[in-house]
């Protein structure tokens, strides 16, 4: 069995590669920068870019199964090339945001476009729809924790069911190598609803350094996040947090049902990423 992993050097893709190697699959990895991929021995690394579908031809030749990172602009072309190459199974990294059918959810529209392209192809498919990734905190809070030891955000009491990227990858890899997942759309969450205040505490415990929490207003957050995020994404994030205050999200057992073990906790995620939060702060202190 030959499996092509697109987005192979991303936070989920790397774990997918590792799981597939452990399962004994013949793994190909697509990346724009093969020289710096740093993937396990035995993985065939191909240069290619999902935004330039024709660059995938060599990587797709002889591939039976495909892990597809979501790039909506070229999804139909990529899927057509996969079908032409004889790919029989596609597992898509999607998002729970596709369940929001209001029409103004930026993430939902992004991922729905990719799902639709795959679903209409006739190739066997599985959609992996994680809720919010814990890794989002790296770009939301990482800089202020590393340099100031503080997190500033509104809705401190808002609980989220943050998921470890390793669990998302494990589910995707399982759907790639095992039968019985065709036509399934798996919504994934972490094992617990944890408030933003408690998320900060867990990160502080993981790095062994106090991290302060400062509540700010939604307008202050809007201005702050607007420096590095497009307005639709800012509004989506603030909307999720505001809604969580009145309608706390409920953890799902999907990860445990598929993998046969509990989903990884937020504390485990914080420990796994302690260096990402602590490194630069230590450098500044020195």
Image (spheres, rainbow, N blue to C red):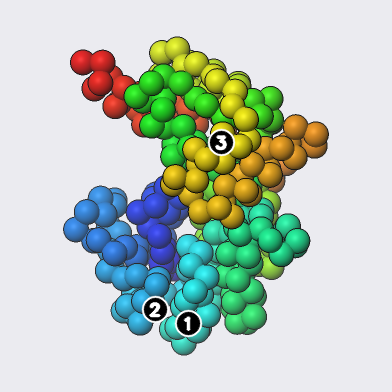
Q: Which residue is mark 1?
A: 77
Residue 255, label in figure: none
Cβ–Cβ under 8 Å for marks 2 and 3: no
> Dot 2, how many residues are within 10 Å of its Cα: few (below 14), some (14-19), or many (20+)?
some
The furthest residue to the bottom: 84
Q: Compare residues 77 and 68 and report the one nearer the observer.
A: 77
> Dot 3, how many residues are within 10 Å of its Cα: few (below 14), some (14-19), or many (20+)?
some
Could you say where residue 242 lies in the image, as x and y percent from the top left?
71, 37
Could you say where residue 46 lies in the image, as x and y percent from the top left?
28, 68
- Can residue 258 be seen from the camera position used here? no
The image quadrant of residue 148 is top left
Cβ–Cβ under 8 Å for marks 2 and 1: yes
At horizontal 51% and vertical 64% (from top left) the residue drawn is 70
* Mark 2: secondary structure: helix
- Of labels 2 and 1, earlier in sequence is 2
* Mark 3: secondary structure: helix
Q: Which residue is mark 3?
A: 221
Q: Compare residues 228 and 208 and report the one nearer the observer.
A: 228
The furthest residue to the right: 246
Spatial distance from mark 2 to mark 3, Cα to Cα? 38 Å
- Of labels 1 and 3, earlier in sequence is 1
At horizontal 35% and vertical 70% (from top left) the residue drawn is 49
Q: Compare residues 256 and 140 and report the one nearer the observer.
A: 140
Relative to 251, does residue 19 appear above or below in the rendering?
Answer: below
The image quadrant of residue 110 is bottom right
- Can residue 275 be seen from the camera position used here? yes
Residue 53, label in figure: 2
* Mark 1: secondary structure: helix
At horizontal 63% and vertical 35% (from top left) the residue drawn is 218
């Amino acid at each position: 069995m030959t499996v092509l992993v697109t987005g192979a050097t991303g936070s989920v893709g790397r774990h997918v590669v590792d799981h597939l190697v452990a399962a004994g699959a013949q793994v190909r990895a697509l990346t724009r920068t093969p020289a710096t991929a740093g993937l396990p021995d035995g993985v065939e690394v191909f240069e290619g870019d999902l935004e330039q579908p024709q660059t995938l031809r060599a990587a797709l030749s002889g591939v039976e199964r495909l892990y597809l990172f979501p790039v909506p602009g070229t999804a139909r072309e990529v899927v057509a090339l996969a079908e032409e190459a004889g790919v029989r199974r596609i597992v898509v990294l999607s998002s729970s945001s596709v369940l929001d059918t209001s029409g103004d959810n930026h993430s939902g529209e992004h991922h729905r476009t990719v799902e639709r392209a795959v679903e209409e192809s006739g190739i066997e498919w599985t959609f992996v729809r994680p809720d919010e990734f814990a890794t989002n905190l790296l770009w939301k809070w990482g800089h202020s924790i590393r340099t100031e030891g503080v997190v500033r955000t509104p809705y401190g009491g808002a609980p989220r069911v943050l998921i470890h990227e390793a669990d998302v990858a494990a589910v995707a890899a399982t759907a790639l190598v095992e039968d019985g997942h065709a036509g399934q759309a798996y919504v994934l969450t972490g094992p617990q609803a944890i408030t933003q205040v408690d998320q900060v505490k867990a990160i502080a415990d993981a790095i062994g350094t106090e991290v302060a929490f400062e509540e700010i207003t939604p307008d202050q957050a809007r201005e702050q996040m607007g420096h590095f995020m497009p307005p639709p994404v800012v509004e989506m994030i603030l909307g999720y947090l505001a809604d969580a205050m009145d309608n706390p999200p409920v953890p799902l057992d999907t990860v445990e049902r598929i993998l046969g073990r509990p989903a990884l906790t937020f504390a485990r995620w914080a420990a796994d990423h302690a260096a990402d939060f602590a490194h630069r702060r230590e450098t500044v202190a020195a």
